[in-house]
Amino acid sequence: MSFLEIARRKKASERVILNIGDCLTWYNLGKDGADGGEMVATYLSNLPRSILCMPIYNGQREVIGVAQLINKRNNQPFTDSDAITFEAFAIFCGLGIHNTQLYESACKLMAKQSVALECLSYHATASPEDTERLRRDEIPSSAHFHLYSYDFSDFSLTDSDTCKATIRMFCELNLVNGFHIPYDVLCRWILSVKKNYRPVKYHNWRHAFNVAQTMFTVLKTGKMEQFLEDLDILGLMVACLCHDLDHRGTNNAFQQLTASPLAVLYSTSTMEHHHFDQCVMILSSEGNNLFQDLSAENYRKVVKIVEKCILSTDLAMYFRKKDKFIELVDNGEISWQGEDKKDLLCGMMMTACDVAAIAKPWEIQHKIAKLVADEFFDQGDLEKEQLNQQPVCSGSAYLE
Ligand SMILES: [Zn+2]
């Protein structure tokens, strides 16, 4: 073991500054005890004259290294002032090493995340068999599904019908031809979106489908499509179908109260950010990219529209923006052009479609209200179970 090695080990174990002005004398005096004895004679000729050695700490005051200076140039021992300057340097080294270690662990975590994402997107995608079946199926007319009606109800439709009705809406809005969406990609994407809704009582695929149908009716029957470009319409329809993806039947307040990982990730509009992330995950999965034929600029634009529209389904966002919207309406706004006004309009349309069940004929409305209430009570049970408290059911934030 070399002299320098001994000095380094001593520093790491004792956590003190070692300042030796004359190494040979220090060795001969046996100040190093047993450690010094391990030094072989051949190293004696290479002994440094002087040495200044100190531990490097991380944020938890653990020794993660040793900094060492040898042989001061003027042949004098290192001074106390040298030691103070060197200590500052050791702190700087500690920060550098700590940051490097953090960076390495962040890289590993990111690699782990992309492996998990790859795995997730593989399993999240619709099967080739289901895709092929839907691709071959006849798509009934809009009239068959009553798609142009605000009184529409999905109760009599099978899951397969809801997928066909979605295709019909995309065709009717000229999105399939207009944006060159390959038909098999459209079928796979719809099935993948459906697959990524959980079987909770209200915020499931049926809710997303109904919101998309209401948007379709608002655009066509309500003639709102005249204020929008085709790209806005594509973004709105995608946003409607994806706006509650992977909903767990619990609201944002519940995520905050239980400090769920999602709440750690997003402190505001927690679930809505997650719905958008899931939407992007599906679009990025192989064979699911509806926007694959768009130019880079239109791609960026439509993803931004989808993001804004999904985030606007957070009712907290609606309450912040509605006064501005009402003010514009009261002032006779009729064109709704310009990015800000269009964003506001699209946000209001999203909320209107999201809560449109309340405006359905009574026999439809009361069935849906029961589903909403059932899911909300399920959350209440979870609150009792996980938070050991009486459910806090803030009536305003659960219908979205
Ligand atoms: Zn919703």
Image (cartoon, grey):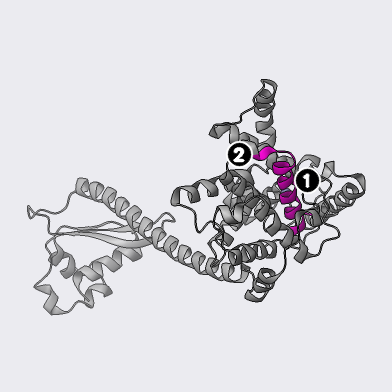
Question: Is 295 contained in the magenta span?
Answer: no
Q: Is residue 268 visible?
A: no
Q: Residue furthest right?
A: 363
Magenta residues span 202-225
Q: Is residue 386 above or below residue 111?
A: above
Nearest to the observer: residue 391 or residue 216: 216
Q: Residue at x 53, y 61 (%)?
A: 284
* Distance from the alpha carbon under mark 1 to that under mark 2: 27 Å
Nearest to the observer: residue 58 or residue 363: 363
The tag earlier along the polypeptide, 1 or 2, is 2
> Label 1 is placed on what type of residue?
Leu
Q: Residue at x 71, y 50 (%)?
A: 212
> Label 2 is placed on what type of residue?
Leu
Question: Which residue is labeled 2 in the image?
Answer: 228
Left or right relative to 232: residue 292: left
Measuring from the top left, give residue 79's x and y in whole percent: 18, 49
Left or right relative to 243: residue 112: left
Question: Which residue is labeled 1 in the image?
Answer: 399
Measuring from the top left, give residue 93's x and y in whole percent: 30, 54
Q: Residues within 10 Å of mark 1 (few under 14, many from 20)?
A: some
- Asked which quadrant contains residue 165, the reply is bottom right
Q: Residue at x 53, y 56 (%)?
A: 291
Q: Secondary structure at mark 2?
A: loop
